[in-house]
C-alpha cells in the first residue's frame, strides 16, 4: 500500500532534520536566511558599484567647487566632475568586463562541479566570493594607490559566485523531492526573494541618491552581514543532493564537460533556430544590455544631472516599466501571436536604432525613449515561450545556458567598447552621437535585420500553432458561454 502524502512528507522531513510543517524537505530558517543574505548583499553590490567606482577616481585638480559642469562633487580625491564621470565609467566597465568573463568560466563548470562536490560547498563559495569582494571594496576605499586594481579584482571574484544558477539547482533538487508539492516551494521562493529584492532595490536607490563620497561604513555593514551569512550557511544550510545522486555522478569533470559539448553540438545540428537565437542574443546584448550602464554617465556628463536627480526621475519610470510588462502579451492575445510577435520584436529593434541617436539632441529625448520602450519590454516571456516550442522541452535548459554564456560575452565585449568610444567632454550633437549613440544604434540595426530575415521566418510554424491553440481555447470558451 502506497504511503499517504502526509506520511511521505513526514518521512522526508525526518530524514532531513526538519519538521513536517516546513515548506519542504531540508528547508528551514537557515536555508531562507542564507538565500536572503545572498540576495541582499549581491543586489546592493551590483546597484552601487558604479557610484562607488566614481569615488575612487583621483586627479591633480584641487578639491573645491566642482569643475566643468554644475552638480555635486563625486570624489573627494578630484573635483573635476566631468573627469570623474568618464574615468569612473571606464573603471566600472573594465571591472564588469572581467566579471562577465569569470561568469563565462564558472557557467561552463558550475553544474558539473555541483554534481561532483555537492550543492552546499558551492553555495558556501558563492557567499564567500561576495564576502571577499566586499572586503576588497573596503581596502579600495582605504588605499588610494591600488584602489582601481582592487576594485577590478573584487568584481572578478563576484563573477565566480554564480549564485543565481546555484540557487536554481538547489530549488530543482528540493522541488523534485517534494513531488506534487514542488510548485509550493517555487511560489514561496518568488514571494520571499521577490519581496527581499524589492526592498533591497529601494534601499540601494535611496543610498545612491545620498551621493556618498565614502562607502567604507556601508561596505563594513555588508561585510558583517555576509560574515553572518557564511556562518549560517556553513552551520545550517542543507545539502540538497541525495546520496543516490552522488553515487550516479562517477564521471570526471573533464568527461562531463566533453559530454556537455557533444550535447551542444547535437542541438546546433538538429535545431538551426538555435544559431539565430544566439546571434540575436549577442547583438541585443551589445546594443542594449551592455549600453545600459552608460545611462548614468551619459546623463550626468552631457546634461548635468546629479546621481540624486537621476534616481528620483528613474523611480517612477521603473515602476511604470514593471507595470507595463503585460502589455506585449495582451497585444499578442488580441491580434494573434504571428502578428503580435512581429509588432513587439520589430518595434523593440527599430526603437533602438531610431531613437537612440536622438538621445544626444536634448535632455528630454532619453526620457522619451524610456517611455517608448515601456510597452515593448514584456516581449521576453513571449520570446522564451517561442524558443521553448522550437527547440523542445529537453533541449531548452541547454539553450538557456548557451544564451547566458553569449549574453555574458556580449556584456564583456560591449561594455569595453562603449567606454572606449565614450567622450565625456563632447559638447556638440555630432560629437555626442559619435561618442554614445552610433555603436548601439548600429547593432540594433543588425539585430533588426537578423530578426526580419532569419529569426521571424524560423518561428513561423510555432507562432501559427500558438494562434491555432488560442483560437481553439476561445472557441471552447464561447461554446461554454452558449451552453
Image: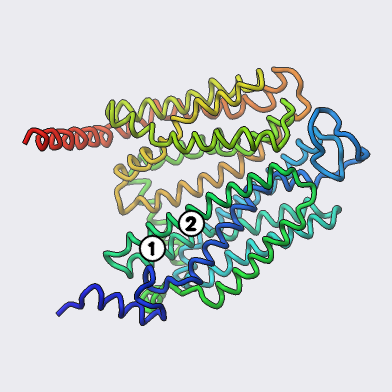
Q: Is residue 97 above or below residue 33?
A: above
Comparing 215 with 442, the one in front is: 215
| SS at circle 1 | helix
Measuring from the top left, give residue 345's x and y in whole percent.
Answer: 41, 29
Q: Is residue 455 left or right of residue 349?
A: left
On the image, the x and y values in percent for residue 362 come to 66, 19
Label 1, residues with CA under 10 Å away: few <14, some 14-19, many ≥20:
some
Is residue 19 or residue 96 the one in the foreground?
Answer: 19
From what the image shows, is residue 410 above or below residue 427?
below
The answer to which of 87 and 371 lies nearer the viewer is: 371
What percent of the width, then of the height, locates residue 352?
Answer: 52, 26
Q: Quick one: quadrant of the N terminus?
A: bottom left
Residue visible at 45% across and 72% down in the picture? 28
Q: Is residue 257 left or right of residue 151?
A: left
Q: Which residue is mark 1?
A: 172
Of callouts 1 and 2, which one flags the residue occurring earlier in the amino acid sequence? 1
**Residue linked to disc 2:** 193
Query: In terms of image quadrants, where is residue 423?
Result: top right
Q: Which mark is residue 473?
A: none
Amino acid at each position: 500500500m502506497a504511503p499517504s502524502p502526509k506520511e511521505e512528507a513526514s518521512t522526508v522531513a525526518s530524514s532531513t532534520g526538519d519538521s513536517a510543517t516546513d515548506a519542504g524537505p531540508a528547508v528551514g530558517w537557515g536555508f531562507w536566511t542564507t538565500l536572503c543574505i545572498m540576495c541582499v548583499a549581491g543586489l546592493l553590490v551590483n546597484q552601487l558599484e558604479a557610484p562607488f567606482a566614481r569615488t575612487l577616481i583621483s586627479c591633480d585638480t584641487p578639491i573645491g567647487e566642482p569643475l566643468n559642469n554644475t552638480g555635486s562633487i563625486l570624489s573627494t580625491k578630484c573635483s573635476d566632475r566631468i573627469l570623474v564621470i568618464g574615468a569612473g565609467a571606464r573603471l566600472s566597465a573594465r571591472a564588469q568586463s572581467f566579471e562577465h568573463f569569470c561568469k563565462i568560466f564558472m557557467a561552463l563548470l558550475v553544474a558539473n562541479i555541483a554534481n561532483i562536490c555537492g550543492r552546499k560547498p558551492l553555495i558556501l563559495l558563492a557567499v564567500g566570493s561576495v564576502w571577499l569582494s566586499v572586503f576588497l571594496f573596503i581596502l579600495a576605499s582605504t588605499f588610494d594607490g591600488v584602489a582601481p586594481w582592487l576594485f577590478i579584482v573584487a568584481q572578478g571574484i563576484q563573477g565566480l559566485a554564480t549564485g543565481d544558477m546555484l540557487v536554481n539547482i538547489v530549488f530543482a533538487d528540493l522541488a523534485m523531492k517534494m513531488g506534487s508539492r514542488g510548485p509550493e516551494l517555487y511560489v514561496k521562493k518568488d514571494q520571499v526573494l521577490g519581496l527581499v529584492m524589492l526592498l533591497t532595490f529601494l534601499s540601494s536607490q535611496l543610498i545612491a541618491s545620498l551621493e556618498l563620497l565614502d562607502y567604507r561604513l556601508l561596505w563594513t555593514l555588508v561585510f558583517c552581514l555576509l560574515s553572518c551569512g557564511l556562518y549560517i550557511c556553513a552551520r545550517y544550510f542543507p545539502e540538497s543532493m541525495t546520496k543516490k545522486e552522488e553515487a550516479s555522478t562517477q564521471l570526471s569533470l573533464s568527461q562531463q564537460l566533453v559530454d556537455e559539448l557533444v550535447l551542444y553540438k547535437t542541438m546546433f545540428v538538429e535545431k538551426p533556430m538555435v544559431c539565430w537565437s544566439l546571434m540575436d542574443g549577442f547583438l541585443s546584448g551589445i546594443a542594449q544590455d551592455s549600453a545600459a550602464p552608460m545611462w548614468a554617465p551619459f546623463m550626468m556628463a552631457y546634461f548635468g544631472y546629479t546621481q540624486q536627480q537621476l534616481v528620483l526621475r528613474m523611480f517612477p519610470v521603473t515602476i511604470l516599466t514593471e507595470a507595463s510588462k503585460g502589455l506585449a502579451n495582451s497585444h499578442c492575445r488580441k491580434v494573434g501571436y504571428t502578428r503580435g510577435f512581429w509588432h513587439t520584436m520589430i518595434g523593440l529593434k527599430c526603437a533602438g536604432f531610431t531613437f537612440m541617436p536622438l538621445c544626444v539632441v536634448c535632455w528630454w529625448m532619453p526620457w522619451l525613449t524610456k517611455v517608448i520602450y515601456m510597452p515593448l519590454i514584456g516581449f521576453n516571456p513571449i520570446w522564451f515561450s517561442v524558443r521553448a516550442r522550437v527547440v523542445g522541452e529537453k533541449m531548452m535548459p541547454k539553450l538557456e545556458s548557451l544564451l547566458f554564456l553569449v549574453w555574458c560575452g556580449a556584456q564583456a565585449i560591449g561594455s569595453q567598447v562603449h567606454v572606449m568610444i565614450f567622450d565625456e567632454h563632447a559638447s556638440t550633437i555630432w560629437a555626442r552621437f559619435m561618442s554614445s549613440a552610433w555603436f548601439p544604434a548600429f547593432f540594433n540595426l543588425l539585430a533588426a535585420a537578423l530578426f526580419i530575415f532569419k529569426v521571424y521566418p524560423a518561428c513561423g510554424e510555432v507562432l501559427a500553432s500558438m494562434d491555432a491553440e488560442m483560437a481553439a481555447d476561445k472557441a471552447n470558451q464561447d461554446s461554454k458561454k452558449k451552453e
